[in-house]
Image (spheres, rainbow, N blue to C red):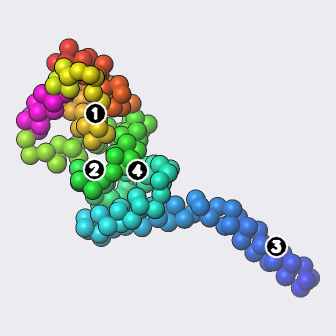
Amino acid sequence: MKRFLWLAVIVVAAGSALWLYARRDALRLQWECYQVTRAANYQDFQQRMEQFERRSRDSRPLEALVARWHTGNERFDDFLASYLFDPQCSDRLREAFSRELSWRQELPAAWARHWRAQKPDVDGQIASLRRYLEALEAAGPPRTITWRDVLDFQAVLVISRHEKLAHRLTPDNWRGRFARWQAAE
């Protein structure tokens, strides 16, 4: 009986070790995301984000991190929303965030609220974005916009009650969305 018990313990321990080894990358990513989300202040968050983004050229870690936005950690939500306006924020993170807005229906409105909180003069910012997009539209050859511009435009579309136009907006498809938004305004 004692041998059987020891054998069972060894089998369970070996199985657990094998499972942990097989899932090591996913567990490491989960731990790294957790480290970013538990930043105590914005400066700490900036440093953690810089390290997090430097570790990988792959977009999967960024997607895993932004998937945690608006899941219950309000401090992380505020820090990430603020960081998207930060000059040190990468376009890869902005792209991952913008794409996440397309998959979860509750996020565009939440993003618009955070965007509005960052902008002192919302009406002036909307007018400025409109003029900028008009200038790009009139320019030849055709120009694309950055992912930061996409995030701004997504927030403006939601604020102006055109949330469907914000869905899956990219630097490549902004022109048609802009034309429809202008026609509706």
Between discs 2 and 3, the one toward the N terminus: 3
Residue type, label 4: Val
Looking at the image, do the residues carrying marks 2 and 3 touch, with CB atoms under 8 Å apart?
Answer: no
Looking at the image, do the residues carrying marks 1 and 3 touch, with CB atoms under 8 Å apart?
Answer: no
**Magenta stretch containing residue 131, yes or no?**
yes
Residue type, label 1: Ile
Q: Quadrant of the C terminus?
A: top left
Left or right: 130, with 87 as reference point: left
| Tag 2 secondary structure | loop
109 or 79, which is in the foreground?
Answer: 79
Mark 1 and mark 4: span between their CA atoms? 21 Å
180 or 16, which is in the foreground?
Answer: 180
Q: Is residue 175 above or below residue 80?
A: above
The residue to which callout 2 is attached is: 84
Mark 4 and mark 3: span between their CA atoms? 38 Å
Q: Where residue 145 is drawn, which disc sits there?
A: 1
Residue farthest to the bottom, as pictured: 2
The residue to which callout 4 is attached is: 66
Q: Residues within 10 Å of mark 2 (few under 14, many from 20)?
A: some
The magenta span reads: 122-133
Q: Where residue 11 is drawn, which disc sits there?
A: 3
Foreground label between 1 and 2: 1
Between discs 1 and 2, the one toward the N terminus: 2
For the point 50% across and 51% down, the residue is 58
Mark 1 and mark 2: span between their CA atoms? 16 Å
Q: Is residue 128 above or below residue 141?
A: below
Name the spot of residue 107 as percent of width and height, x first: 35, 41
